[in-house]
Structure formats: structure tokens, C-alpha cells
């Protein structure tokens, strides 16, 4: 599995689990495409795994943008979570 996803309130949240290479980009796009057609979201949010994505990750993102545009679905792209973005971990009592 190359992508994790969640579907909440009409928004499909996709996360690339790792930076893609040329051998994994087609599979990642096929997963993305299947999720788009299965959920028919009103908005898509894609989170990239690095702040400097590989050409294969950008290619997959470009293909996702085109299909979202064709389906009339707005797309938002965000970078990786930083320590400040993560919720605090519970402390042991």
C-alpha cells in the first residue's frame, strides 16, 4: 500500500506513505483513482511525505490534479507534518 486515506464530511484525505519512485508511481495513481471513483468526494486533500518530493511523486500528483479537474473536484496539496502539527502524545500516568 502506497497511500493511506480517510473520508470525512465529503473530503477525501490522501497521504503518500513514502516518496515515490518510477516503479511505484503508477500503482499510487491507480490507488488514488480508485478512491476518487469509490468515494466521489466534494474535495480532495493530498499530503506529500517530504518537502522536496521526487519527480515520480510530482508525476502522481499531476495525474491526480488532472483527474480531479476533469471530475470538478477541488484539490488541496499539503506538505509533511512537522512536530508542531502533530497532536501531543498522551503521557503515561
Image: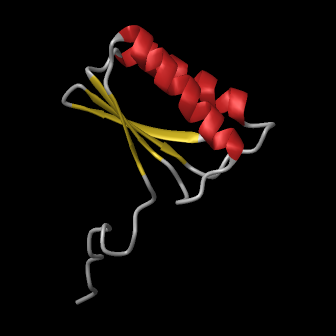
Left or right: where 77 falls relative to 33? left
Quadrant location of the C terminus? bottom left
> Which residue does the image show at 36% across and 18% down from the upper left?
39
Quadrant location of the N terminus? top right
Q: Residue furthest right?
A: 23
Q: Quadrant of residue 6?
A: top left
Relative height, residue 67 to residue 61 (above, below) = above
Q: Position of residue 83 (x, y in %)?
A: 37, 75
Q: Residue furthest left?
A: 9
> Which residue does the image show at 54% across and 39% down from the upper left?
3
Q: Is residue 1 visible?
A: no
> Which residue does the image show at 23% across and 25% down from the upper left?
10
Q: Position of residue 63 (x, y in %)?
A: 57, 24
> Which residue does the image show at 30% across and 76% down from the upper left?
89
Q: Quadrant of residue 8?
A: top left
Q: Position of residue 23 (x, y in %)?
A: 81, 36
Left or right: where 29 falls relative to 51? right
- Viewer-nearest residue: 45 or 10: 45
Relative height, residue 92 to residue 16 (above, below) = below
Amino acid at each position: 500500500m502506497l497511500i493511506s486515506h480517510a473520508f470525512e464530511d465529503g473530503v477525501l484525505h490522501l497521504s503518500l506513505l513514502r516518496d515515490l519512485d518510477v516503479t511505484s508511481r503508477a500503482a499510487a495513481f491507480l490507488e488514488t483513482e480508485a478512491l476518487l471513483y469509490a468515494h466521489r468526494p466534494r474535495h480532495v486533500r493530498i499530503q506529500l511525505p517530504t518537502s522536496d518530493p521526487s519527480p515520480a511523486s510530482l508525476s502522481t500528483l499531476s495525474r491526480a490534479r488532472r483527474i480531479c479537474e476533469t471530475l470538478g473536484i477541488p484539490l488541496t496539496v499539503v506538505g509533511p507534518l512537522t512536530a508542531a502539527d502533530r497532536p501531543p502524545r498522551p503521557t503515561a500516568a
